[in-house]
């Protein structure tokens, strides 16, 4: 392998470049990024950058040592694959880029709402800086979506003295991520922060100066100086149309992040890997494909993808992990509870510190912690190992998670 192209300048792309070099790849290496900024971390965009506490989230990478050509402000526009295992060409605004190894790390794009009014999303550092300047005292800020990003933006806007309203289509915050029962436990946080939360409300359009709401009667409106939309993201796959790769919610890969062709045989392409927010990767742990749009996966999965691209044996099967800082609380989650049998409360959710554990039999599937970082750390180890636990002990907040493990 003599020439590798990395498409995507986010954390996953940078870590893939670093992993390739650390594993002995000595050939030409090029990273293509649609943004003109040096690669940076995204989690601070809805936190420190938006709050004005930081303005530099550049990823710490030694580009000279990496010997990596950076094509910043250039966008991939298409992909042509040669025969199996023989590379191909990335079409881009910088011209055609031939390769014999490709890392697809183009991430995801925010979902927006219909309407001709101005709507802000929070995906790039330019988005964060622009919105930051508009969060002035007394400004009417309406946020669509009470998910992770919506809650974080509401937290910062309220601290800056804005009049904040959050509109959510589901009946509770975080209904998609955690389910309505758990999402309902976060409702008091909004009132505590002085944020108006309106659930079960659907938006028809973003208009000049506010939102038009959908409903049987129609015509209701919420006035706003600024509208922020945080209703999710979609993998950035448009440039891969017609490439022959299998695209289903994301770029379909095996457990090593090697891509799969859209043919009857489901041919694996060992010369093309996908990683980060755009990759729908097979998990042996959960027996299905996962699309995990979080920092921890972007940080750690590229090591496996780089190994696979270089022909080494490697499988990624970590339990997902993510966190959110909202309304003065550190909220952390590890595992996957989609098929769990039941949940148990670990502490009183009306208090400041509590957790929820999801179980199947005596297996700990997932945990959500609120200001209980030790629980999170210990639970991640238990989940990774698959060690059985005592359900009664795990429900006792005075028993350390590691002590709930059955011998």
Image (cartoon, rainbow, N blue to C red):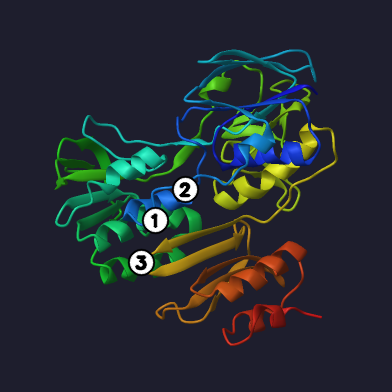
Query: Left or right of 70: which side holds 126?
Result: left
Q: Residue at x 74, y 78 (%)?
A: 405
* Residue picked out by circle 1: 48
Q: Nearer the viewer, mark 3 or mark 2?
A: 2
Looking at the picture, how far across and down is residue 33, in whole percent?
Answer: 52, 29
Secondary structure at badge 3 equals loop
* Residue picked out by circle 2: 57
User: Which numbered disc, 3 or 2, marks the residue that appears first in the sequence?
Assistant: 2
Position of 178 relative to 352 (above/below): above
What separation in Å lies between label 1 and label 2 (alpha carbons)?
Answer: 9 Å
Badge 1 vs badge 2, beta-carbon distance below 8 Å: yes
Question: Residue 2: which disc?
Answer: none
Secondary structure at badge 2 equals loop
Who is closer to the viewer here, 287 or 377? 377
Looking at the picture, how far across and down is residue 115, in whole percent?
Answer: 24, 31
Looking at the picture, how far across and down is residue 155, in whole percent?
Answer: 32, 61
Query: Left or right of 41: which side holds 246?
Result: right
Q: Residue at x 81, y 43 (%)?
A: 314
* Residue picked out by circle 3: 327
Outermost residue, front direction?
64
Position of 108 relative to 71 (above/below): below
Position of 253 relative to 86 (above/below): below
Looking at the picture, how far across and down is residue 239, in whole percent?
Answer: 54, 21
């Amino acid at each position: 392998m003599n020439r590798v192209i990395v498409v995507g300048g986010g954390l996953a792309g940078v870590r893939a470049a670093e992993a390739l070099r650390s594993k002995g790849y000595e050939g030409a290496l090029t990273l293509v990024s649609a943004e003109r900024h040096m690669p940076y971390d995204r989690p601070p965009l809805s936190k420190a950058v938006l709050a004005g506490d930081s303005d530099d989230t550049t990823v710490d990478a030694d580009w000279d040592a990496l010997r990596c050509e950076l094509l910043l402000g250039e966008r991939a526009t298409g992909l042509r694959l040669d025969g199996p295992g023989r590379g191909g060409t990335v079409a881009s605004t910088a011209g055609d880029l031939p390769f014999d190894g490709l890392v697809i790390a183009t991430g995801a794009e925010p979902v927006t709402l219909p309407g001709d009014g101005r709507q802000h999303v929070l995906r790039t550092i330019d988005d964060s800086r622009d919105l930051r300047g508009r969060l002035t005292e007394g400004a009417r800020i309406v946020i669509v979506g009470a998910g992770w990003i919506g809650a974080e933006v509401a937290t910062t806007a309220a601290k800056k003295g804005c009049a904040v309203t959050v509109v959510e289509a589901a009946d509770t915050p975080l209904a998609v991520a955690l389910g309505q029962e758990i999402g309902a436990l976060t409702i008091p946080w909004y009132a505590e922060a002085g944020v108006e939360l309106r659930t079960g409300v659907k938006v028809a359009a973003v208009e000049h100066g506010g939102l038009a709401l959908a409903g049987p009667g129609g015509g209701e409106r919420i006035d706003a100086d600024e509208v922020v939309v945080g209703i999710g993201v979609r993998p950035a796959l448009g440039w891969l149309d017609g490439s022959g790769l299998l695209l289903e919610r994301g770029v379909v890969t095996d457990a090593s992040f090697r891509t799969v062709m859209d043919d009857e045989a489901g041919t694996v392409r060992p010369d093309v890997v996908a990683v980060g927010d755009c990759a729908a990767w097979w998990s042996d742990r959960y027996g299905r494909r996962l699309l995990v749009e979080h920092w921890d996966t972007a940080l750690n999965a590229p090591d496996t993808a780089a190994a696979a691209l270089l022909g080494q044996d490697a499988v990624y099967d970590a339990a997902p992990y993510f966190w959110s800082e909202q309304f003065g609380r550190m909220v952390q989650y590890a595992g996957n509870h989609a098929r769990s049998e039941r949940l148990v409360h670990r502490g009183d959710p009306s208090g400041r510190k509590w957790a929820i554990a999801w179980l199947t039999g005596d297996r700990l599937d997932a945990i959500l912690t609120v200001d209980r970082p030790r629980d999170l750390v210990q639970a991640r180890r238990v989940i990774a190992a698959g060690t059985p636990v005592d359900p009664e002990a795990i429900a006792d907040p005075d028993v350390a998670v590691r002590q709930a493990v059955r011998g």
